[in-house]
């Protein structure tokens, strides 16, 4: 399965973030899942890809040309896809992902997983179930889920939209979420397709 992972190029200030990123990468390698990510070699991106590669897993890095020029792209990946810009990069990662996980990260991570959430809401991920997960390491996404609560309460989203975002706190949660991946997505209600 292709799992698109969004996460920071920084480490953050909690050592648990890096530990969980490495645990995720090692688990993906062990289970034969292919990593699709932003091709970075530092921070959370470096941790998840290091562990996956050390475990013999496959990783596809997707990066815009300007990151290649800035030498911020990992070169020892199974494949590196060079995108013209950030929009093309995001679209490629969505199109090729079977499931999506956001580890702790910054503005880029939030931008990317929010776009996936929107695609899921609009039924643009296709007819198969592609789980969208926030890996809530040590409460990192608690306030984000609080904001989703507010959106629901203020009638800016529906319960089904809220339910489309899966909170995971460990590998076992991820495995449970992935158990439905590839089945027909019964939540597809898009009037836009």
Image: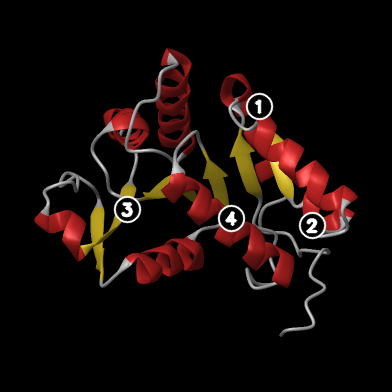
Mark 4 vs mark 1: which is more N-terminal? Answer: 4
Q: Please tell me whether mark 2 sits on a helix, a strand or a loop.
A: helix
Label placed on residue 61? none
In this view, the residue in front, 59 or 56, is 59
Q: Secondary structure at mark 1?
A: helix
Label 3 residue SS? strand
Which residue sits at x=75%, y=52%? 164
Task: Give the CA separation, mark 1 to mark 2.
Answer: 23 Å
Residues at marks 2 and 4, CA–CA distance in whole angstroms: 12 Å
Q: Quadrant of residue 13?
A: top left
Q: Of discs 4 and 3, which sits in the foreground? A: 4
Name the N-terminal-most of marks 2 and 4.
4
166 on left or right of 69 = right
Q: Horizontal and vertical percent for residue 119? A: 63, 67
- How far apart are labels 4 and 3 at the CA level? 21 Å
Few, some or many C-alpha atoms within 10 Å of disc 2 (few <14, some 14-19, many ≥20)? some
Q: Which residue is mark 1?
A: 172
Question: Residue sitting at 65 percent across and 44 percent down?
Answer: 178
Q: Quadrant of the C terminus?
A: bottom right
Tell me what residue is drawn at x 77 percent, y 63 percent: 185
Q: Earlier in the sequence, mark 3 or mark 2?
A: 3
Image height check: is 32 above or below 25? below
**Front position among marks 1 and 2:** 2
What residue sits right under mark 2 in the picture? 161
Give 109 or 180, whichever is nearer the viewer: 109
Residue 57 appears in view:
yes
Question: Dot 4 corresponds to which residue?
Answer: 114
- Sequence-wise, the earlier of marks 1 and 2 is 2
Q: CA distance from mark 1 to mark 3?
A: 24 Å
């Amino acid at each position: 399965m292709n799992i698109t992972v969004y996460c920071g190029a920084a480490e953050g200030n909690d050592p648990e973030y890096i530990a969980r990123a490495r645990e995720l990468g090692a688990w993906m390698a062990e289970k034969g899942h292919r990593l699709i990510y932003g091709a970075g070699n530092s921070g959370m991106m470096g941790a998840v890809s290091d562990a996956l590669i050390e475990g013999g897993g496959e990783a596809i890095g997707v990066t815009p040309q300007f990151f290649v020029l800035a030498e911020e792209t990992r070169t020892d990946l199974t494949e590196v896809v060079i995108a013209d810009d950030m929009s093309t990069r995001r679209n490629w990662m969505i199109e090729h992902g079977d499931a999506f996980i956001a580890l702790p990260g910054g503005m880029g991570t939030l931008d990317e997983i929010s776009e996936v959430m929107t695609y899921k809401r609009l039924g643009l991920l296709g007819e198969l179930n592609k789980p969208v997960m926030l890996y809530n390491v040590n409460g990192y996404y608690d306030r984000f889920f609080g904001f989703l609560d507010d959106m629901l309460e203020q009638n800016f989203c529906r319960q089904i939209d809220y339910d489309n975002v899966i909170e995971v706190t460990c590998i076992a949660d991820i495995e449970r979420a992935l158990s439905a991946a590839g089945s027909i997505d019964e939540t597809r209600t898009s009037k836009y397709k």
